[in-house]
């Protein structure tokens, strides 16, 4: 579990993710700007929209802590055509056309760790 981050400043505080540096949060007060490294939790996969999918078809992955930068693999092939929900809980992707057929898993990796799905059967196009 990641410890909570408490900020105390007056009269105003702004906090926003720093997209250029994974796992950091930049805070700005009227007095100064600081950068603190906050380790985000590792991703988890809680479900897949289907248990069998053909190459070129879409699949939805549900879970948590899906944040950029992210690497998604289906079997041994990297998925490059995907979208992430703003909440970091849903990935929708297109199975690569050259994905290996047969049983496989989906692997989601971020700088904080990786998660693997249950077995997914991939069929030809």
Image: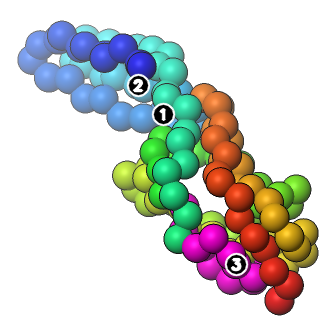
The residue that label 2 is drawn on is 26
Residue 67 lies in the magenta-colored region: no
Q: Residue furthest left?
A: 11
Q: Residue at x 88, y 56 (%)?
A: 76
- The 10 Å Cα crowd at callout 2, few under 14, some 14 to 19, many 20 or more, is some
Depth check, front residue: 101 or 3: 101
Pick the residue in front: 56 or 29.
Answer: 56
* Image vertical order of residue 62 relative to residue 121, above or below: above
Tag 2 or tag 3, which sits nearer the N-term? 2
Left or right: residue 24 versus residue 30 is: right
Quarter containing the C terminus: bottom right
**How many numbered markers are drawn?**
3
How busy is the neighbourhood of tag 3: few (under 14 within 10 Å), some, or many (20 plus)? Answer: many
As helix, strand or loop, the secondary structure at mark 2 comes to strand
Residue 92 is situated, as x and y percent measured from the top left of the image, at: 55, 68
Tag 3–tag 2 contact (CB < 8 Å): no
- Asked which quadrant contains residue 122, the reply is bottom right
Q: Is residue 37 visible?
A: yes
The numbered mark at residue 53 is: 3
Q: CA distance from mark 1 to mark 3?
A: 36 Å
The numbered disc on residue 18 is 1
Q: Earlier in the sequence, mark 2 or mark 1?
A: 1
The answer to whether mark 2 and mark 1 are in CB contact below 8 A is: yes
The spot of residue 97 in percent (x, y) is: 84, 79
User: Which comes sooner in the sequence, label 1 or label 3?
Assistant: 1
The residue mark sitting in front, 3 or 2, is 3
Q: Give the residues drawn in magenta, as a range.
A: 50-61
């Amino acid at each position: 579990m990641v410890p909570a981050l408490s900020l105390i400043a007056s009269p105003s505080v702004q906090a926003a993710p720093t997209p250029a540096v994974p796992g950091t949060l930049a805070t700005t007060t009227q007095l100064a700007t600081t950068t603190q490294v906050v380790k985000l939790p590792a991703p988890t996969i809680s479900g897949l929209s289907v248990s069998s999918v053909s190459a070129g078809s879409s699949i939805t992955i549900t879970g948590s802590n899906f944040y950029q930068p992210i690497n998604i693999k289906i079997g041994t092939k990297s998925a490059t055509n995907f979208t992430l929900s703003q909440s970091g809980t849903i990935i929708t992707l297109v199975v690569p056309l050259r994905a290996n057929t047969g049983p496989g898993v989906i692997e989601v990796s971020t700088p904080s760790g990786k998660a693997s799905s249950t077995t997914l059967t991939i069929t030809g196009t």
